[in-house]
Image (tube, rainbow, N blue to C red):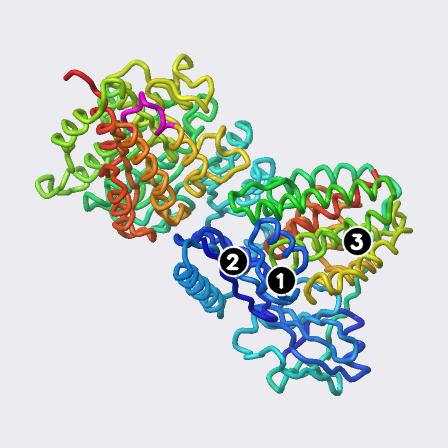
Amino acid sequence: MRFAKSGDGDFIQRIIHHKFHGFVHSTFNRTLNIQCLDSGDLYSIACKGIDNAPNTLIIDLEHFEEADIRVNDVVSSDHAILSISNKMFIPMDGIKKWNCELPKYPSEADVLIMNVSTMKQYIKLHGNSSRIERAFKGGNPFDDEMSRMLHERTQLLVLELQNKRMSTAIKHATSLIGLGPGLTPAGDDFLVGLFTVFNIENHRYFSHQSFCEEVVLHAKTLTNDISYMALAKAAVGQVRESISALMEALFRGSEEELLLALGRVLAIGSTSGTDIALGIVAGLEMNM
Amino acid sequence: MTVQVLVKPNTYIDSVSLMSLSTKANQIEIVEQAIIAMGTEMNKEVIRNVGLMTPEVESAKTSDLVIIVKAASEELCEGAFESINELLTKKKDSSKGKSEVKYSTITSAVNGTPEANLAIIAVNGSYAPREARKALENNLHVMLFSDNVSIEDEIELKTLAQEKGLLMMGPDCGTAIIGNVALCFANAVRKGNIGIVGASGTGSQEVTVRIHEFGGGITQLIGTGGRDLSEEVGGIMMLAGIKALEEDDATKVIVLVSKPPAPSVEEKVLAQIKQCKKPVVVWFVGGNEEKVTQAGGHFAKMSKEAALKAVLLAGADESKLNKRTLNLPLIEEVRAKLKPQQKYIRGLFSGGTLCDEAMHIAMEKFDNVYSNIQREPEYRLKDVRVSQDHTFIDFGDDQFTQGKPHPMIDPSTRIERFIQEAKDPSVGVIVMDFVLGFGAHEDPVGAMLPAIIEAKQAAEDEGRHLEIIGYILGTELDSQNIEGQINKLLASGATHASSSQNAGLLAREFVVKGE
């Protein structure tokens, strides 16, 4: 029996009130992904210390190494208990529900302007050498070319969005999907950051959420399932807790609060956090 | 060139492991280029653009892991795949059962690990003083790796530490050994009865390594940060360090390592040496012997001399020590090979004090010694990219490290400069250091090896001999395998110097003409 600490409210509801049928899609040291047979959506079970996220349950476990859970193991729910091939049972008793709520855009932008400037500086110093930020010359032709394409395409996307040329913006955004090293490609991560901002109420681009939805329509075949799920959720304003906390800190936080929140985002993946943060900065600067 | 592809269907590896795997695959000696990425359409476009597209890659799916290897032959490609598979397996094994606790703030770390008594801080300089202050207020000794901390903040932090009886090592402190634990950049050395207070990172490393080689050992190595002995800071940490070692029962001999202090600070340090009940060996690079001797200290002009004096004062039997004297026949042999116009030394160093020591050794015989760290403005390089006569470059200096890792981690800048210097027909000797130990590059000699072999061959094709001296700072306890590093260096045709001091002396003597 594994105690669940917290989790996405909708996922918990589904386990409690409906039958969940699925299988293990992929396993990592501290996270495992489950594919739902009914919807095809991915859900995650993550170990403690990882932040809440859409479609995710956080359980009281350090890592999955000894659980012997394998890809294609059957996952089902009954009587509010999620079970994974009789290897792990997760009851929903006492679980803390979490739902992603993005903060509203502030009416006064003074704090935000100062915080964005601090954030940019901090990313430069502490970000994990993103290939988006600058054309990277590492001596490896693949890395150099990847970096050139990422840099060029994100610049073009931002330019088209600034000029409200939405159809070409969709084209450039689509050209970023699946582009980049890592499990969640850098282009996808940048878009997650950008989509987050576009889902902020009162932001200039809030009325352009259809942009996010259209881009995601193309994403299904252009990137892997795990990255697609993050993009699809971000397109409707559903992001990890650390990202929504960063938005709150950007809008209303002190420098210390901002850096603490930013540090948590930068720690995501290898360069994913940095690329998400760069997407957020690009989105916010369009409104300034 | 052969390109081979392996597509692993539905394989998901977390980003951190994937990127690290990709970096390591590209470091495999036989690999010209390796690509490890998910098989998305956009990644395929990049692969197409760099000319490595194959039908297997073309048919890969977004959920597939694509591994591409380019090497000289089919056989080498297969060897590379084997190595990559090994890396993949290792990655899986190494993540098993491990969990580490990460704290976001000093306060949560203090609450989470109440038994801790030291904090290492390596955040951006703008935020470092605040974090250091928090640590001191929580009664933690501090090692502050960060630089770009204002002198006012340094004084305030050191004063606070002094009031609380704590160590405030740094800012800009990269080397310490506390309670036999090496912190940041340090070497694995024996436990013993010699304590060191060092304002210089690689200088202190060199002394610990020489002491280890002479059979001695270290109690503590307390770093002070490079600015501690300035007029403004007043040597607060150096004085506190001497006092701490004097009070430490395990320490029998104290060694001080630094550039010469500011005059008023020198007086304070000498006064403390005079009062100290334990013998104090002083190696202030380019410092004044008379003043140290008058204060009752033991003056050392060079690093090996400092280590030797320390181990003898600590009780070693001199007759049993191998002092590794200079190889005089080699000096004659190299002098004969160099042409009259090959007059100059080019020193390319990753360690600042190693550079300083070699430069001072050269300055004893030559007037025209230039550097980016010269104290005399007249002899400071006007353009660090262009060498002049005898030139010694510290690649760890700020001009070279802004936005780039330290050369002890990333040797690329030095490799480029080495290639440039090797082409200069007025150069007789290139001398370099290779620093091993915690935090340092896994294979510093290996990274430089192709450039050395190519440069020596190019010089030979032009009918000149190019002498390359390499000094490897490390011990047999360091993880990088010092013996393997020495063998690689010798295999490239370079000369191996047994100490920083000997590297400087050999470089100087090789280019002396007409003696």
Q: Residue at x 27, y 30 (%)?
A: B466
- The local crowd at label 1, few if under 14, some if 14 to 19, many if 20 or more residues have their Cα within 10 Å, is some
Q: Are marks 3 and 1 on the same chain?
A: no
| Label 1 sits on residue | B58
Q: Nearer the viewer, residue A71 or A7?
A: A71
Locate the C terminus of chain B by quadrant. top left
Q: Residue at x 84, y 52 (%)?
A: A200
The alpha-carbon separation of the residues under discs 2 and 1 comes to 52 Å
Estimate the x, y position of residue B112 in percent, counting from the top left. 55, 59
Vertical placement of residue A85 versus A134, above or below: below
> Is residue B423 rendered magenta in the image?
yes
Q: Chain of mark 3?
A: A
Badge nearest the viewer, 2 or 1: 1
Q: Residue at x 12, y 31 (%)?
A: B329
Res. B249 in view:
no
Q: Chain of mark 2?
A: B
Q: Residue furthest left?
A: B319
Q: Which mark is residue B113?
A: 2
Residue type marked 3: Phe
- The local crowd at label 3, few if under 14, some if 14 to 19, many if 20 or more residues have their Cα within 10 Å, is many
Residue type marked 1: Glu
Estimate the x, y position of residue A84 in percent, counting from the top left. 64, 82
Tell me which segment is drawn in magenta: B421-429
Res. B479 in view:
yes
- The local crowd at label 2, few if under 14, some if 14 to 19, many if 20 or more residues have their Cα within 10 Å, is few
Q: Chain of mark 1?
A: B
Estimate the x, y position of residue A188 in percent, counting from the top left. 71, 55
Residue type marked 2: Thr
